[in-house]
Image (cartoon, grey):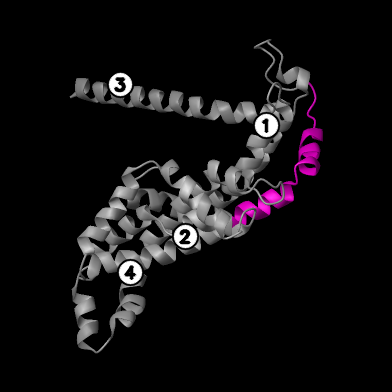
């Protein structure tokens, strides 16, 4: 018995040690970003590995970045893009998921197979046709151009389809007997029961939209119409970069998602547990 307890404690100690090392490995880049944001350019490029903290904490990098790179526009564009993509994705995926999960209609399996094929191919394949569509609509450098790829989502359709299929048919059949039409059954009975799946989809859509880099750089070349990710990419020089200013900009760019996570921390965890995916 004592040997079993000893082995169990050793196993737990090894697991905790591995988790601690993994946590430190993930925290180091963020710590380096935070400390570099308060350094001078000479301190950030110093080779001495023992100089970790800045000699004096300077906030000039944040002021320079805020004034030089129109961060107010970057914040506005990013938050609006996230909001509209989440709303469009949840609306379209909820309706499509209900149709594929609960209704029978001709060509259902074929259409759903096309959705699965869209998930299997790289998203970069759709950039050229999507760009041509936005360009022909004269919508470059607009909010519509940023939101356009997120109007529909194959992943969201699959997620909501599974959520609707997991619900029992008793409530829907009872509503049908009481005289509810398909719209009433969807809006009043079925949709409220998939609220957790909608929250999961909204969380994933927000994170994917925040990390989107290639599409904003292609369709929004103006400094006042692009997003945080594209703006950060344009701050890096071809031959040299001002690392303190770049890290200050990166730290400022992280703030929206940090605030959103702190507010919706419970929903983030439930979303990952519900969908079985990772951010």
Q: Can residue 254 be seen at all in this image of the molecule?
A: no
Neighbour class for label 2 at 10 Å: few (<14), some, many (≥20)?
A: some
Circles 4 and 3: CB atoms closer than 8 Å: no
Q: Which residue is mark 1?
A: 247
Of tags 2 and 4, which is closer to the observer? 2
Tell me if 114 is positioned left or right of 251 in this view.
Answer: left
Question: What residue range appears in magenta?
Answer: 55-82
Give the spatial CA distance, label 4 vs label 3: 44 Å
Q: Which residue is mark 4?
A: 193
Instruction: Specify which label sits upstream in the sequence, 1 or 2.
Output: 2
Q: Is residue 62 magenta?
A: yes
The residue at the point 47 percent across, 29 percent down is 23
Neighbour class for label 3 at 10 Å: few (<14), some, many (≥20)?
A: few
Give the spatial CA distance, label 1 vs label 4: 43 Å
Neighbour class for label 4 at 10 Å: few (<14), some, many (≥20)?
A: some
Classify mark 4: helix, strand or loop.
Answer: helix
Instruction: Specify which label sits upstream in the sequence, 1 or 3.
Output: 3
Q: Is residue 28 magenta?
A: no
Q: Is residue 102 above or below residue 30?
A: below
Circles 2 and 4: CB atoms closer than 8 Å: no
Q: Residue furthest front?
A: 136
């Amino acid at each position: 018995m004592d040997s079993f307890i000893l082995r169990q404690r050793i196993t737990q100690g090894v697991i905790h040690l591995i988790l601690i090392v993994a946590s430190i490995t993930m925290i180091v880049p963020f710590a380096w970003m935070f400390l570099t944001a308060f350094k001078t350019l000479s301190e950030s490029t110093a080779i001495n590995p023992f100089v970790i903290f800045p000699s004096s904490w300077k906030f000039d990098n944040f002021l320079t970045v805020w004034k030089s790179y129109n961060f107010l526009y970057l914040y506005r564009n990013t938050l609006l893009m996230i909001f509209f993509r989440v709303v469009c994705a949840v609306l379209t995926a909820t309706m499509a998921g209900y149709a594929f999960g609960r209704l029978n209609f001709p060509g259902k399996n074929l259409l759903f197979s096309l959705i699965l094929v869209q998930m299997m191919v790289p998203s970069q394949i759709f950039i050229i046709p999507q760009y041509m569509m936005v360009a022909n609509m004269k919508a470059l450098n607009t909010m519509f151009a940023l939101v356009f790829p997120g109007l529909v989502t194959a992943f969201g359709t699959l997620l909501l389809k599974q959520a609707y299929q997991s619900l029992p048919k008793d409530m829907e059949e009872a509503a049908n007997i009481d005289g509810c039409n398909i719209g009433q059954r969807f809006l009043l009975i079925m949709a409220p029961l998939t609220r957790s799946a909608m929250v999961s989809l909204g969380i994933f859509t927000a994170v994917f939209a925040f990390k989107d880099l290639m599409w904003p750089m292609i369709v929004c070349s103006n400094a006042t119409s692009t997003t945080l990710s594209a703006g950060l990419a344009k701050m890096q020089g071809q031959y040299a970069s001002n690392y303190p200013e770049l890290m200050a900009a990166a730290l400022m760019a992280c703030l929206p998602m940090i605030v959103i996570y702190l507010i919706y921390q419970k929903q983030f965890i439930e979303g990952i547990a519900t969908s079985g995916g990772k951010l």
